[in-house]
Image (cartoon, rainbow, N blue to C red):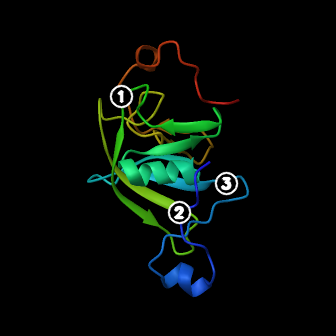
Amino acid sequence: MMKNKFGKRISIEQVEEGNSLMPKFDDNGLIPVITVESGTELILMHGYMNEESLDLSIDTNLAHYWSRSRKKIWKKGETSGQFQHIKEILIDDDQDCLIIKVELDGLGASCHVGYKSCFYRKVDKDLSLEFIEKEKVFDPEEVYEGEENPTIL
């Protein structure tokens, strides 16, 4: 088990105005992460990190997440080759949410469905979904051959 290397949250002033990283993980030990493509500012995905995956991400400059469906650390790109190279990590005012800015490897996509962004549809007034990305960057059947789909019904 890794030792907590992040600062201890003692005061609001320290959390909001201080220079120490003191992330607030939820009751499940997770912190939400929004992943953005560096340069284009396109939102690629939303995920979660636990203490270990955040530590690995900082140490390696490669995005690591906590996979809630697989219940394990997930190094983004390990199966697909779509690695996310971290260029910048931002944390919000009360240190309970992260934004990571990344550059993409491989085919330049982030979504396991094959689109560049996981946010490839928008919600219309009639509650239907409209595709805003018209074409997939890759065929997930080929890239993830033999792998189980991480989407949970």
Residue occupied by mark 3: 29
Position of residue 20 measured from the top left corner of the image (x, y, whole percent): 47, 75
Residue occupied by mark 2: 5
Is 134 on the left-hand or right-hand side of 129? Answer: left
The earlier-in-sequence mark between 2 and 1 is: 2
Query: What amino acid type is highlighted by mark number 3?
Result: Gly
The earlier-in-sequence mark between 2 and 3 is: 2
Position of residue 101 measured from the top left corner of the image (x, y, whole percent): 36, 54
Query: What amino acid type is highlighted by mark number 2?
Result: Lys
Dot 1: few (<14), some (14–19), or many (≥20) neighbours within 10 Å? some
Position of residue 115 measured from the top left corner of the image (x, y, whole percent): 41, 32
Residue occupied by mark 1: 81
Q: Is residue 118 above or below residue 37?
A: above
Q: Is residue 95 above or below residue 1?
A: below
Image quadrant holding the C terminus, namely top right
Q: Is residue 10 above or below residue 60?
A: below
Residue at the farthest right position: 27
Query: What amino acid type is highlighted by mark number 1?
Result: Gly
